[in-house]
Amino acid sequence: MLDEALFLLRPRSEGWVIDGTVGMGGHAEAMLEWTTDDVRVLGLDADPEALARARARLARFGARAVLHRGSFREIGGIARDHHISTARSVLLDLGVSSWQIEESGRGFSFAAPEPLDMRLNPDAPRTAADLVNRLPEAELARIISEYGDEPFARRIAARIVRHRPLRSTEDLVAAVRAAVPRARWPRRTHVATRAFQALRIAVNDELGALSEALPQVAALLAIGGRCGVISFHSGEDRIVKRTFRALASDAFALLEPSPLRPGADEVRANPRARSAKLRVVERLSR
Ligand SMILES: C[S@@+](CC[C@H](N)C(=O)[O-])C[C@H]1O[C@@H](n2cnc3c(N)ncnc32)[C@H](O)[C@@H]1O
């Protein structure tokens, strides 16, 4: 998918690429390697630690790589601050990186005992612990059901509320394990995967940020410019699909009617890619 995304989004003339989720800088690095000196990349990330890693990785590109800490929710204003009026391409590779899950220590993973934080932006107002310990049970159940597609959301929410306060990832895993009947534990994934994903999406208001960003991205695209979004969750993909379909007209065209999916080899090498979908839209006229 990386190669496909980069191939589809590689600018065919000079100008700006905006990587709205620069993360560790992997996509941005490949984009800079694949293009000539007249293509520059503005990379955004909400997570200052991820951005520091991207900065080190992209240092060799000098002024071609510009990095900015912020949310893609404000992508239009951030582009303006950098005097960028149009972009040749915009990439959003949603969610969290493997590094954040495995090494950030912020409680994104059920695999390690960590505090229940889950914030991408350390200055964001609410942690996952705040949500599980303070939200009404019905609201907690809605979040776990809607953002996690979890069939046992109500039972999990009830269990959480009965065992408050939850402080660590272990407490959350224990609540999910106790709430989901053993016979219904998924075979290929951890039983708490969906609840963890749901809380992370809620803590970071990931769907709200995406909904606000896409119209700004559309307004930024140059003629012939493309926007690609890689999503991992049905709620994200629904927002991308609806927005791109609504845009598709004389001014915009969808590159493919259905999303691109990773191949079997990629899923084997990286199981987290199994739910990834790439959708691309192109601006035809102003
Ligand atoms: C899947 S990773 C991107 C990996 C990146 N493409 C790479 O090659 O390393 C997603 C990144 O998006 C960031 N992110 C998520 N929501 C964001 C938002 N609203 N604004 C800016 N960055 C965000 C996360 O902090 C994370 O670093």
Image (spheres, rainbow, N blue to C red):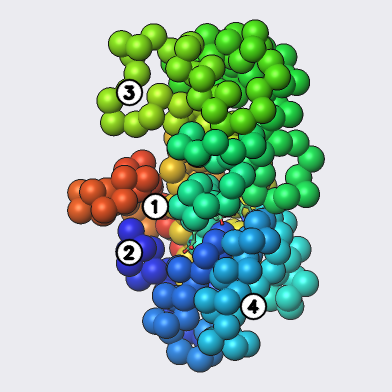
Inspect the image, locate mark 4, and give the three-letter code of the amino acid beneath it. Answer: Val
Marks 1 and 3, Cα distance to the nearest angstrom? 26 Å
Marks 1 and 2, Cα distance to the nearest angstrom? 9 Å
Q: Nearer the viewer, mark 1 or mark 3?
A: 3
Residue 283 seen in this snapshot: no
Residue that label 3 marks: 186
Q: Residue furthest left?
A: 265
Q: Nearer the viewer, mark 4 or mark 1?
A: 4
**Residue at (65, 57) in percent of width and height:** 47
Is the residue marked 2 within 8 Å of ligand 1, measured from its CB? no
Residue that label 1 marks: 278
Left or right: 39 in relation to 209: left
Q: Marks 2 and 4: in contact by CB < 8 Å?
A: no
Marks 4 and 3, Cα distance to the nearest angstrom? 42 Å
Task: Find numbered disc 4 in the image and state the secondary structure of the residue it sits on.
Answer: strand
Q: Earlier in the sequence, mark 4 or mark 2?
A: 2
Residue that label 2 marks: 4
Task: Find numbered disc 2 in the image and state the secondary structure of the residue it sits on.
Answer: helix
Looking at the picture, does residue 250 appear above or below residue 119?
below
Q: Is 188 or 40 nearer to us in this picture?
A: 188
State the image coordinates of residue 200 (x, y, percent, origin top left): 59, 37
**Residue at (64, 12) in percent of width and height:** 163
Q: Residue furthest front?
A: 113
Marks 4 and 1, Cα distance to the nearest angstrom? 25 Å
Task: Find numbered disc 3 in the image and state the secondary structure of the residue it sits on.
Answer: loop
